[in-house]
Amino acid sequence: HRIHLTNPRHVVPESNMPGYPWLETTPVPMDSIAPKMRALSKLGVPYTSAQIDAAAKEVEGRTEMDALIAYLQGLGLALK
């Protein structure tokens, strides 16, 4: 996943997808996670208060690339 997101043409030479190399070094903004989760819970996403409270700690030390990969992997699980 990381190689594909950093430079897609290393995986698929004819790809026209842009690379997103900065995601590898950009930290997840920990202070924005809980407010976003609270807003999403008001829209129906079933986050618990415990999940929201623990969110900043769970993303500590993670990058935007880590977050994007986790999101993409979760998409497949949500369909099952």
Image (cartoon, helix red, strand yellow):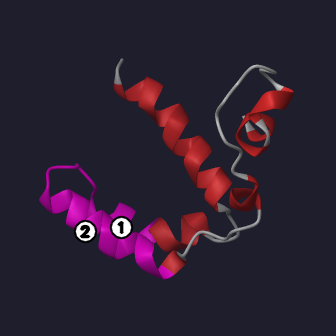
Residue 10: x and y in percent read: 86, 29
Residue 43: x and y in percent read: 14, 55
Mark 1 lies on a secondary structure that is helix
Looking at the rendering, the stretch of residues picked out in magenta corresponds to 31-54
- Membership of 36 in magenta stretch: yes
Q: Residue at point 22% right, 49% down?
A: 45
Please state which amino acid type lies under the numbered disc 1. Ile
Residue 76: x and y in percent read: 46, 24
Mark 2 lies on a secondary structure that is helix
Q: Residue at point 14% right, 50% down?
A: 44
Query: Which image quadrant is residue 50 in?
Result: bottom left
Q: What is the C-alpha distance between the residues marked 2 and 1? A: 7 Å
Q: Residue at point 76% right, 54% down?
A: 21
Please state which amino acid type lies under the numbered disc 2. Arg
The quadrant in which the C terminus is found is top left
Say whether residue 1 is left or right of residue 79.
Answer: right
Residue 55: x and y in percent read: 46, 67
Residue corresponding to mark 2: 38
Q: Look at the picture and state if 43 lies above or below 1.
A: below
Q: Residue furthest bottom?
A: 31
| Residue 52 numbered mark, or none | 1
**Is the Cβ of the residue at disc 2 closer than 8 Å to that at disc 1?**
yes
Q: Residue furthest right?
A: 10
- Membership of 70 in magenta stretch: no
- The 10 Å Cα crowd at callout 1, few under 14, some 14 to 19, many 20 or more, is some
| Residue 35 numbered mark, or none | none
In the foreground, 25 or 9: 9
In the foreground, 57 or 21: 21
Instruction: Name the front one of labels 2 and 1.
Output: 2
**What is the chief secondary structure element of the magenta stretch?**
helix
Looking at the image, is mark 2 or mark 1 earlier in the sequence? 2
